[in-house]
Image: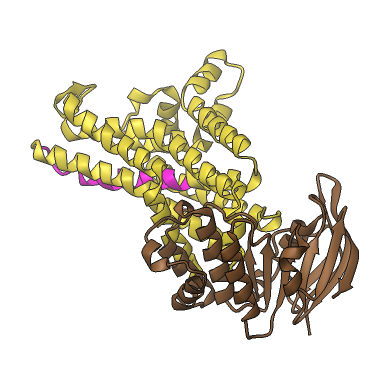
Chain colours: A yellow, B brown
Amino acid sequence: MKNLSLVAYLDIKESLRARWFYVYAFVFGGLMGLFFISGITDSVVMGFTGLSRLLLVFIQVTIIILPIFILITTVKSISSDRESNVLEYMLSFPISLSEYYWGKLLGRFVTVFFPVIVALFVGVAWGLFKGGQMPWAMIFLYSALIFSICAVFLGIAFLISTMVKSHDIALGLSFTVWIVLLAFIDVALIGLMMQNRVSDEVILTVAMLNPLEAFRIGAIALFDPELTVIGPVAYYLLDSLGHTFLMIYAVVYPILLGVIFALLGYAVFKKRDIL
Amino acid sequence: MKIVEARGVTKKFMGAKVLDSVTLDIELGEKIAMMGPNGAGKTTLVRAILGFYHLDGGSIRVESYDPTKERVEVLKKIAFIPQLPPPVKLSVSELLTFVERSTGTKKSDVISQADAMELDLKRHKEKPFFKLSGGMKQKLLIAIALARRSRLLVFDEPTANLDPKAREHFYTLLNSLEYEHSSIFITHRLEEVEGLVNRKIYMDLGKVVEDEKV
Protein backbone atom coordinates (compact mmCIF):
# COMPACT_ATOMS: atom_id res chain seq x y z
CA MET A 1 0.00 0.00 0.00
CA LYS A 2 2.95 2.34 -0.55
CA ASN A 3 1.00 4.47 -3.02
CA LEU A 4 -1.99 5.06 -0.73
CA SER A 5 -0.30 7.94 1.09
CA LEU A 6 0.94 9.29 -2.26
CA VAL A 7 -2.59 9.37 -3.72
CA ALA A 8 -3.94 10.93 -0.50
CA TYR A 9 -1.19 13.55 -0.41
CA LEU A 10 -1.68 14.52 -4.06
CA ASP A 11 -5.46 14.66 -3.62
CA ILE A 12 -5.00 17.07 -0.70
CA LYS A 13 -2.62 19.24 -2.71
CA GLU A 14 -5.05 19.23 -5.64
CA SER A 15 -8.01 20.11 -3.39
CA LEU A 16 -6.12 22.97 -1.78
CA ARG A 17 -5.93 24.61 -5.21
CA ALA A 18 -9.51 23.84 -6.19
CA ARG A 19 -12.21 26.50 -6.21
CA TRP A 20 -14.67 24.30 -4.32
CA PHE A 21 -12.26 24.13 -1.38
CA TYR A 22 -12.05 27.92 -1.11
CA VAL A 23 -15.84 28.24 -1.23
CA TYR A 24 -16.13 25.47 1.37
CA ALA A 25 -13.56 27.02 3.72
CA PHE A 26 -15.05 30.47 3.15
CA VAL A 27 -18.57 29.28 4.02
CA PHE A 28 -17.53 27.75 7.35
CA GLY A 29 -15.06 30.52 8.19
CA GLY A 30 -17.62 33.11 7.07
CA LEU A 31 -20.30 31.53 9.25
CA MET A 32 -18.13 31.92 12.31
CA GLY A 33 -17.36 35.51 11.31
CA LEU A 34 -21.07 36.15 10.90
CA PHE A 35 -21.77 34.73 14.33
CA PHE A 36 -19.13 37.00 15.88
CA ILE A 37 -20.50 40.08 14.12
CA SER A 38 -24.12 39.27 14.96
CA GLY A 39 -23.21 38.91 18.64
CA ILE A 40 -24.54 35.40 19.12
CA THR A 41 -22.20 34.92 22.07
CA ASP A 42 -23.99 37.71 23.87
CA SER A 43 -27.52 36.54 23.17
CA VAL A 44 -29.63 34.23 25.31
CA VAL A 45 -31.99 31.90 23.49
CA MET A 46 -33.82 29.05 25.21
CA GLY A 47 -31.40 29.23 28.09
CA PHE A 48 -28.20 28.95 26.05
CA THR A 49 -25.72 31.77 26.10
CA GLY A 50 -22.09 32.66 25.40
CA LEU A 51 -19.82 30.07 23.85
CA SER A 52 -22.37 27.27 24.21
CA ARG A 53 -24.86 29.29 22.22
CA LEU A 54 -22.28 30.00 19.51
CA LEU A 55 -21.29 26.36 19.14
CA LEU A 56 -24.88 25.19 19.22
CA VAL A 57 -25.81 27.49 16.35
CA PHE A 58 -22.67 26.47 14.45
CA ILE A 59 -23.44 22.78 14.76
CA GLN A 60 -27.08 23.33 13.76
CA VAL A 61 -26.00 25.09 10.57
CA THR A 62 -23.36 22.40 9.98
CA ILE A 63 -26.10 19.73 9.93
CA ILE A 64 -27.67 21.44 6.95
CA ILE A 65 -24.73 22.52 4.82
CA LEU A 66 -21.90 20.08 5.56
CA PRO A 67 -23.58 17.01 3.99
CA ILE A 68 -24.52 18.73 0.73
CA PHE A 69 -21.06 20.27 0.40
CA ILE A 70 -19.36 16.91 0.91
CA LEU A 71 -21.74 15.09 -1.45
CA ILE A 72 -21.68 17.61 -4.30
CA THR A 73 -17.95 18.40 -4.30
CA THR A 74 -16.83 14.79 -3.94
CA VAL A 75 -19.21 13.35 -6.51
CA LYS A 76 -18.46 16.21 -8.90
CA SER A 77 -14.69 15.87 -8.78
CA ILE A 78 -14.68 12.08 -9.14
CA SER A 79 -17.19 11.96 -11.99
CA SER A 80 -15.50 14.82 -13.84
CA ASP A 81 -12.15 12.99 -13.48
CA ARG A 82 -13.78 10.04 -15.17
CA GLU A 83 -15.44 12.05 -17.93
CA SER A 84 -12.35 14.12 -18.73
CA ASN A 85 -10.12 10.99 -18.87
CA VAL A 86 -7.99 12.05 -15.89
CA LEU A 87 -8.90 8.72 -14.29
CA GLU A 88 -7.82 6.85 -17.44
CA TYR A 89 -4.40 8.46 -17.36
CA MET A 90 -3.74 8.28 -13.61
CA LEU A 91 -4.83 4.65 -13.49
CA SER A 92 -2.56 3.71 -16.38
CA PHE A 93 0.26 3.79 -13.81
CA PRO A 94 0.98 0.74 -11.64
CA ILE A 95 -1.24 1.64 -8.73
CA SER A 96 -3.67 -0.87 -7.28
CA LEU A 97 -7.33 0.03 -7.26
CA SER A 98 -7.40 -0.19 -3.46
CA GLU A 99 -4.50 2.28 -3.14
CA TYR A 100 -6.22 4.68 -5.50
CA TYR A 101 -9.69 4.42 -3.96
CA TRP A 102 -8.70 4.53 -0.29
CA GLY A 103 -6.00 7.13 -0.95
CA LYS A 104 -8.57 9.41 -2.62
CA LEU A 105 -11.00 8.85 0.25
CA LEU A 106 -8.37 9.62 2.87
CA GLY A 107 -7.23 12.76 1.06
CA ARG A 108 -10.78 13.96 0.62
CA PHE A 109 -11.56 13.26 4.29
CA VAL A 110 -8.72 15.53 5.38
CA THR A 111 -9.86 18.36 3.12
CA VAL A 112 -13.52 18.26 4.20
CA PHE A 113 -12.86 17.68 7.91
CA PHE A 114 -10.24 20.31 8.67
CA PRO A 115 -11.96 23.54 7.57
CA VAL A 116 -14.96 22.72 9.78
CA ILE A 117 -12.80 21.78 12.75
CA VAL A 118 -10.68 24.89 12.31
CA ALA A 119 -13.85 27.03 12.22
CA LEU A 120 -15.04 25.30 15.41
CA PHE A 121 -11.75 26.06 17.18
CA VAL A 122 -11.79 29.67 15.97
CA GLY A 123 -15.24 29.94 17.54
CA VAL A 124 -13.95 28.46 20.80
CA ALA A 125 -11.03 30.91 20.82
CA TRP A 126 -13.42 33.79 20.26
CA GLY A 127 -15.70 32.58 23.05
CA LEU A 128 -12.76 32.33 25.45
CA PHE A 129 -11.64 35.81 24.42
CA LYS A 130 -15.09 37.08 25.29
CA GLY A 131 -14.71 35.61 28.75
CA GLY A 132 -16.35 32.19 28.40
CA GLN A 133 -15.27 28.94 30.06
CA MET A 134 -13.39 26.26 28.10
CA PRO A 135 -16.16 23.77 27.19
CA TRP A 136 -14.00 20.63 26.97
CA ALA A 137 -16.86 18.14 26.80
CA MET A 138 -18.51 20.12 24.06
CA ILE A 139 -15.36 20.50 21.97
CA PHE A 140 -14.61 16.81 22.27
CA LEU A 141 -18.15 15.76 21.37
CA TYR A 142 -18.50 18.20 18.49
CA SER A 143 -15.15 17.20 17.01
CA ALA A 144 -16.25 13.56 17.18
CA LEU A 145 -19.64 14.38 15.65
CA ILE A 146 -18.10 16.37 12.79
CA PHE A 147 -15.67 13.48 12.20
CA SER A 148 -18.55 11.02 12.05
CA ILE A 149 -20.75 13.15 9.77
CA CYS A 150 -17.80 13.63 7.38
CA ALA A 151 -17.25 9.85 7.41
CA VAL A 152 -20.83 8.94 6.58
CA PHE A 153 -21.30 11.48 3.78
CA LEU A 154 -17.92 10.73 2.22
CA GLY A 155 -18.88 7.05 2.26
CA ILE A 156 -22.17 7.87 0.51
CA ALA A 157 -20.42 10.17 -2.00
CA PHE A 158 -17.84 7.53 -2.92
CA LEU A 159 -20.55 4.89 -3.31
CA ILE A 160 -22.57 7.17 -5.62
CA SER A 161 -19.43 8.04 -7.62
CA THR A 162 -18.60 4.42 -8.26
CA MET A 163 -22.17 3.37 -9.06
CA VAL A 164 -23.13 6.21 -11.38
CA LYS A 165 -20.84 7.23 -14.22
CA SER A 166 -22.86 10.19 -15.49
CA HIS A 167 -21.92 13.48 -13.88
CA ASP A 168 -25.49 14.86 -13.94
CA ILE A 169 -27.13 11.73 -12.52
CA ALA A 170 -24.51 11.55 -9.74
CA LEU A 171 -25.21 15.16 -8.77
CA GLY A 172 -28.98 14.61 -8.88
CA LEU A 173 -28.67 11.51 -6.72
CA SER A 174 -26.50 13.35 -4.18
CA PHE A 175 -29.07 16.09 -3.91
CA THR A 176 -31.88 13.57 -3.49
CA VAL A 177 -30.02 11.73 -0.70
CA TRP A 178 -29.47 15.02 1.13
CA ILE A 179 -33.09 16.16 0.80
CA VAL A 180 -34.49 12.79 1.92
CA LEU A 181 -32.22 12.61 4.98
CA LEU A 182 -33.01 16.20 5.86
CA ALA A 183 -36.74 15.63 5.46
CA PHE A 184 -36.57 12.64 7.78
CA ILE A 185 -35.02 14.70 10.57
CA ASP A 186 -38.35 16.16 11.53
CA VAL A 187 -40.76 17.20 8.83
CA ALA A 188 -41.60 13.78 7.47
CA LEU A 189 -41.30 12.06 10.85
CA ILE A 190 -43.71 14.44 12.54
CA GLY A 191 -46.05 14.09 9.59
CA LEU A 192 -46.01 10.30 9.98
CA MET A 193 -46.60 10.54 13.73
CA MET A 194 -49.52 12.89 13.30
CA GLN A 195 -51.19 10.66 10.75
CA ASN A 196 -51.02 7.70 13.15
CA ARG A 197 -50.86 5.36 10.18
CA VAL A 198 -47.43 4.03 11.02
CA SER A 199 -46.43 2.44 14.30
CA ASP A 200 -44.15 4.32 16.68
CA GLU A 201 -41.49 1.62 16.31
CA VAL A 202 -41.24 2.23 12.57
CA ILE A 203 -40.92 5.98 13.07
CA LEU A 204 -38.24 5.50 15.72
CA THR A 205 -36.36 3.05 13.53
CA VAL A 206 -36.45 5.49 10.61
CA ALA A 207 -35.19 8.26 12.90
CA MET A 208 -32.42 6.07 14.31
CA LEU A 209 -31.30 4.97 10.84
CA ASN A 210 -30.93 8.56 9.68
CA PRO A 211 -27.33 9.67 10.37
CA LEU A 212 -28.42 13.31 10.36
CA GLU A 213 -30.92 12.65 13.14
CA ALA A 214 -28.21 10.81 15.11
CA PHE A 215 -25.89 13.79 14.62
CA ARG A 216 -28.57 16.24 15.71
CA ILE A 217 -29.50 14.27 18.80
CA GLY A 218 -25.85 13.96 19.81
CA ALA A 219 -25.22 17.65 19.25
CA ILE A 220 -28.14 18.85 21.33
CA ALA A 221 -28.25 16.20 24.03
CA LEU A 222 -25.21 17.80 25.65
CA PHE A 223 -27.08 21.05 26.32
CA ASP A 224 -30.53 19.76 26.76
CA PRO A 225 -30.46 16.33 28.42
CA GLU A 226 -34.25 16.12 28.05
CA LEU A 227 -34.09 16.91 24.31
CA THR A 228 -37.22 19.01 24.66
CA VAL A 229 -36.06 21.54 22.08
CA ILE A 230 -35.77 19.25 19.09
CA GLY A 231 -39.04 17.56 18.80
CA PRO A 232 -41.02 14.53 19.89
CA VAL A 233 -39.07 11.82 18.08
CA ALA A 234 -35.74 12.69 19.71
CA TYR A 235 -37.45 12.98 23.09
CA TYR A 236 -39.04 9.57 22.62
CA LEU A 237 -35.69 8.06 21.61
CA LEU A 238 -34.03 9.48 24.69
CA ASP A 239 -36.75 8.10 26.88
CA SER A 240 -36.52 4.64 25.31
CA LEU A 241 -32.76 4.28 24.90
CA GLY A 242 -31.14 6.43 27.55
CA HIS A 243 -28.76 9.38 27.39
CA THR A 244 -25.40 7.57 27.33
CA PHE A 245 -26.40 5.07 24.67
CA LEU A 246 -27.75 7.84 22.46
CA MET A 247 -24.54 9.86 22.73
CA ILE A 248 -22.36 6.87 21.82
CA TYR A 249 -24.75 5.92 19.05
CA ALA A 250 -24.66 9.46 17.61
CA VAL A 251 -20.90 9.24 17.13
CA VAL A 252 -20.34 5.56 16.32
CA TYR A 253 -23.30 4.81 14.04
CA PRO A 254 -22.48 7.37 11.28
CA ILE A 255 -18.84 6.23 11.26
CA LEU A 256 -19.89 2.61 10.87
CA LEU A 257 -22.38 3.54 8.18
CA GLY A 258 -19.71 5.56 6.35
CA VAL A 259 -17.31 2.61 6.45
CA ILE A 260 -20.01 0.28 5.11
CA PHE A 261 -20.88 2.66 2.24
CA ALA A 262 -17.19 3.17 1.43
CA LEU A 263 -16.61 -0.60 1.38
CA LEU A 264 -19.63 -1.08 -0.88
CA GLY A 265 -18.25 1.66 -3.13
CA TYR A 266 -14.91 -0.11 -3.28
CA ALA A 267 -16.59 -3.42 -4.14
CA VAL A 268 -18.45 -1.72 -7.01
CA PHE A 269 -15.27 0.09 -8.14
CA LYS A 270 -13.40 -3.22 -8.34
CA LYS A 271 -16.20 -5.17 -9.96
CA ARG A 272 -17.26 -2.76 -12.69
CA ASP A 273 -15.44 -1.25 -15.66
CA ILE A 274 -13.28 1.62 -14.46
CA LEU A 275 -14.12 3.85 -17.42
CA MET B 1 8.55 -13.63 -26.61
CA LYS B 2 4.88 -12.68 -26.41
CA ILE B 3 4.11 -9.41 -24.69
CA VAL B 4 0.35 -9.48 -25.27
CA GLU B 5 -1.80 -12.52 -25.86
CA ALA B 6 -5.47 -11.79 -26.61
CA ARG B 7 -7.79 -14.74 -27.21
CA GLY B 8 -11.37 -14.30 -28.42
CA VAL B 9 -11.74 -10.96 -26.64
CA THR B 10 -15.33 -9.78 -26.59
CA LYS B 11 -16.60 -6.62 -24.96
CA LYS B 12 -20.14 -5.28 -25.07
CA PHE B 13 -21.48 -1.88 -24.11
CA MET B 14 -25.25 -1.72 -23.60
CA GLY B 15 -25.61 -5.01 -25.44
CA ALA B 16 -23.64 -3.91 -28.52
CA LYS B 17 -20.40 -5.74 -29.28
CA VAL B 18 -17.54 -3.26 -29.41
CA LEU B 19 -14.92 -6.00 -29.52
CA ASP B 20 -15.98 -9.16 -31.27
CA SER B 21 -13.79 -12.22 -30.60
CA VAL B 22 -10.51 -10.44 -31.17
CA THR B 23 -7.49 -12.74 -31.19
CA LEU B 24 -4.10 -11.07 -31.35
CA ASP B 25 -0.54 -11.69 -30.25
CA ILE B 26 2.09 -8.99 -29.89
CA GLU B 27 5.69 -10.15 -29.83
CA LEU B 28 8.54 -8.27 -28.21
CA GLY B 29 10.05 -5.92 -30.76
CA GLU B 30 6.89 -5.47 -32.82
CA LYS B 31 5.89 -1.89 -33.65
CA ILE B 32 2.25 -1.85 -34.62
CA ALA B 33 0.14 0.75 -36.39
CA MET B 34 -3.45 0.13 -35.30
CA MET B 35 -5.91 1.71 -37.68
CA GLY B 36 -9.59 1.77 -38.41
CA PRO B 37 -12.58 4.09 -38.52
CA ASN B 38 -14.09 5.70 -35.43
CA GLY B 39 -15.89 3.11 -33.33
CA ALA B 40 -13.82 0.24 -34.76
CA GLY B 41 -12.76 -0.84 -31.24
CA LYS B 42 -9.10 0.30 -31.25
CA THR B 43 -9.26 2.35 -28.05
CA THR B 44 -11.47 -0.25 -26.36
CA LEU B 45 -8.91 -2.97 -27.14
CA VAL B 46 -6.09 -0.85 -25.73
CA ARG B 47 -8.14 -0.03 -22.63
CA ALA B 48 -8.87 -3.74 -22.17
CA ILE B 49 -5.11 -4.44 -22.35
CA LEU B 50 -4.61 -1.74 -19.70
CA GLY B 51 -7.17 -3.47 -17.47
CA PHE B 52 -9.90 -0.83 -17.54
CA TYR B 53 -12.61 -3.21 -18.73
CA HIS B 54 -13.94 -6.55 -17.54
CA LEU B 55 -14.34 -8.70 -20.63
CA ASP B 56 -17.59 -10.35 -21.69
CA GLY B 57 -15.64 -13.16 -23.33
CA GLY B 58 -12.12 -14.35 -24.02
CA SER B 59 -8.94 -13.42 -22.19
CA ILE B 60 -5.98 -11.10 -22.29
CA ARG B 61 -2.55 -11.77 -20.83
CA VAL B 62 0.30 -9.30 -20.67
CA GLU B 63 3.43 -11.35 -20.12
CA SER B 64 1.17 -13.98 -18.52
CA TYR B 65 -0.51 -11.47 -16.16
CA ASP B 66 -4.25 -10.76 -16.18
CA PRO B 67 -4.84 -7.00 -16.66
CA THR B 68 -7.86 -6.80 -14.33
CA LYS B 69 -6.70 -9.19 -11.62
CA GLU B 70 -2.99 -8.30 -11.66
CA ARG B 71 -3.17 -4.70 -12.85
CA VAL B 72 -0.08 -3.51 -10.98
CA GLU B 73 2.15 -6.15 -12.60
CA VAL B 74 0.62 -5.44 -16.02
CA LEU B 75 0.93 -1.66 -15.75
CA LYS B 76 4.57 -1.89 -14.71
CA LYS B 77 5.17 -3.12 -18.24
CA ILE B 78 3.04 -0.60 -20.15
CA ALA B 79 3.41 3.13 -20.73
CA PHE B 80 0.36 4.84 -22.14
CA ILE B 81 -0.17 8.17 -23.86
CA PRO B 82 -3.81 9.15 -24.31
CA GLN B 83 -5.25 10.78 -27.40
CA LEU B 84 -5.90 14.09 -25.66
CA PRO B 85 -3.91 15.21 -22.62
CA PRO B 86 -6.33 14.96 -19.68
CA PRO B 87 -6.84 18.09 -17.53
CA VAL B 88 -4.79 16.77 -14.62
CA LYS B 89 -4.88 19.38 -11.85
CA LEU B 90 -1.57 18.40 -10.28
CA SER B 91 1.37 20.71 -10.85
CA VAL B 92 4.14 19.47 -13.16
CA SER B 93 6.33 18.82 -10.13
CA GLU B 94 3.57 16.84 -8.37
CA LEU B 95 2.91 14.82 -11.51
CA LEU B 96 6.60 13.92 -11.69
CA THR B 97 6.49 12.91 -8.01
CA PHE B 98 3.51 10.68 -8.78
CA VAL B 99 5.37 9.09 -11.70
CA GLU B 100 8.55 8.63 -9.67
CA ARG B 101 6.87 7.08 -6.65
CA SER B 102 4.46 4.86 -8.57
CA THR B 103 6.85 3.58 -11.26
CA GLY B 104 10.34 4.16 -9.91
CA THR B 105 11.17 6.41 -12.89
CA LYS B 106 13.57 9.15 -11.85
CA LYS B 107 12.42 12.73 -12.32
CA SER B 108 15.77 13.51 -13.92
CA ASP B 109 15.07 10.91 -16.64
CA VAL B 110 11.73 12.57 -17.47
CA ILE B 111 13.41 15.98 -17.49
CA SER B 112 16.11 14.84 -19.92
CA GLN B 113 13.50 13.28 -22.24
CA ALA B 114 11.56 16.56 -22.08
CA ASP B 115 14.77 18.51 -22.83
CA ALA B 116 15.23 16.39 -25.94
CA MET B 117 11.80 17.58 -27.06
CA GLU B 118 12.72 21.19 -26.26
CA LEU B 119 10.40 21.35 -23.25
CA ASP B 120 11.96 23.12 -20.30
CA LEU B 121 10.25 21.45 -17.35
CA LYS B 122 12.22 23.34 -14.73
CA ARG B 123 10.63 26.59 -15.90
CA HIS B 124 7.13 25.17 -15.61
CA LYS B 125 7.42 22.85 -12.62
CA GLU B 126 5.03 24.80 -10.37
CA LYS B 127 2.41 25.27 -13.08
CA PRO B 128 -0.68 23.03 -12.96
CA PHE B 129 -0.43 20.49 -15.76
CA PHE B 130 -3.76 21.54 -17.29
CA LYS B 131 -2.53 25.12 -17.69
CA LEU B 132 0.31 24.10 -20.03
CA SER B 133 -0.31 24.54 -23.75
CA GLY B 134 -1.65 21.54 -25.70
CA GLY B 135 1.75 20.86 -27.26
CA MET B 136 3.59 21.13 -23.95
CA LYS B 137 1.20 18.73 -22.27
CA GLN B 138 1.63 16.19 -25.04
CA LYS B 139 5.42 16.53 -24.91
CA LEU B 140 5.39 15.96 -21.16
CA LEU B 141 3.22 12.85 -21.49
CA ILE B 142 5.57 11.54 -24.17
CA ALA B 143 8.61 12.32 -22.00
CA ILE B 144 7.05 10.45 -19.06
CA ALA B 145 6.17 7.44 -21.22
CA LEU B 146 9.64 7.23 -22.79
CA ALA B 147 11.44 7.73 -19.48
CA ARG B 148 9.60 4.78 -17.99
CA ARG B 149 11.41 2.38 -20.35
CA SER B 150 8.39 0.09 -20.48
CA ARG B 151 8.25 -3.11 -22.51
CA LEU B 152 5.09 -1.96 -24.25
CA LEU B 153 4.44 1.63 -25.32
CA VAL B 154 0.86 2.47 -26.22
CA PHE B 155 0.27 5.71 -28.10
CA ASP B 156 -3.25 6.84 -28.90
CA GLU B 157 -2.82 9.47 -31.67
CA PRO B 158 0.38 10.70 -30.01
CA THR B 159 1.21 13.53 -32.38
CA ALA B 160 -2.25 15.11 -32.55
CA ASN B 161 -1.18 18.21 -30.60
CA LEU B 162 2.39 18.50 -31.86
CA ASP B 163 3.77 20.92 -34.42
CA PRO B 164 5.92 19.47 -37.26
CA LYS B 165 9.18 20.16 -35.42
CA ALA B 166 7.98 18.48 -32.22
CA ARG B 167 6.81 15.51 -34.30
CA GLU B 168 10.30 15.16 -35.71
CA HIS B 169 11.76 15.22 -32.19
CA PHE B 170 9.25 12.58 -31.14
CA TYR B 171 10.15 10.26 -34.02
CA THR B 172 13.85 10.75 -33.38
CA LEU B 173 13.39 9.92 -29.70
CA LEU B 174 11.40 6.80 -30.51
CA ASN B 175 14.05 5.63 -32.96
CA SER B 176 16.76 6.23 -30.42
CA LEU B 177 15.22 3.98 -27.73
CA GLU B 178 17.91 1.38 -27.24
CA TYR B 179 16.17 -1.22 -25.10
CA GLU B 180 13.95 -3.92 -26.55
CA HIS B 181 10.29 -3.01 -26.52
CA SER B 182 7.04 -3.16 -28.46
CA SER B 183 4.77 -0.27 -29.45
CA ILE B 184 1.18 0.21 -30.48
CA PHE B 185 0.32 3.42 -32.35
CA ILE B 186 -3.39 4.05 -32.69
CA THR B 187 -3.63 6.32 -35.68
CA HIS B 188 -5.76 7.49 -38.57
CA ARG B 189 -2.73 8.62 -40.58
CA LEU B 190 -0.45 5.74 -41.43
CA GLU B 191 2.02 8.04 -43.21
CA GLU B 192 2.89 9.61 -39.85
CA VAL B 193 4.15 6.39 -38.28
CA GLU B 194 5.01 4.43 -41.40
CA GLY B 195 8.75 4.61 -40.81
CA LEU B 196 8.35 3.48 -37.22
CA VAL B 197 6.21 0.35 -37.59
CA ASN B 198 6.79 -3.19 -38.76
CA ARG B 199 3.20 -4.39 -38.52
CA LYS B 200 -0.17 -2.96 -39.52
CA ILE B 201 -3.46 -3.97 -37.95
CA TYR B 202 -6.74 -2.72 -39.36
CA MET B 203 -9.86 -2.98 -37.22
CA ASP B 204 -13.51 -2.49 -38.13
CA LEU B 205 -16.74 -3.23 -36.25
CA GLY B 206 -14.84 -4.68 -33.32
CA LYS B 207 -12.83 -7.19 -35.35
CA VAL B 208 -9.31 -7.37 -36.71
CA VAL B 209 -9.95 -7.33 -40.48
CA GLU B 210 -6.37 -6.98 -41.69
CA ASP B 211 -3.08 -7.86 -40.04
CA GLU B 212 0.15 -7.70 -42.02
CA LYS B 213 3.87 -7.42 -41.34
CA VAL B 214 5.72 -4.70 -43.23
**A138 left or right of A234?**
left
Q: Is residue A243 above or below residue B193?
A: above
Whether residue A180 is visible to the viewer of this picture, yes or no, is yes
Question: Front-most of B192 and A265?
Answer: B192
Region of the chain picked out in magenta, as a range:
A132-152
Q: Position of residue A243 (x, y in %)?
A: 36, 38
User: x, y percentage for residue A162?
Assistant: 62, 48
Was residue A135 drawn as part of the magenta stretch in this picture?
A: yes
Q: Position of residue B167 (x, y in %)?
A: 61, 65
Up the image or down, B83 lies above or below A204; here it is: below
| x, y percent for residue A209 | 53, 37
In the image, taking residue A115 as reference, residue B185 lies left or right, namely right
Q: Is residue B98 above or below residue A271?
A: below
Of all residues shown, which one is farthest toward the top?
A: A195
Where B119 sits versus A177, above or below? Answer: below
Q: Residue at x 16, y 29 (%)?
A: A41
Q: Is residue B16 magenta?
A: no
Q: Nearer the viewer, residue A31 or A258?
A: A31
Residue at 18% x, 23% y is A44
Q: Specify whether A5 is left or right of B84.
A: left
Res B66 quadrant in image: bottom right
Q: Name which residue lies at 16% across and 23% down.
A: A43
Give residue A130's quadrant in the image.
top left
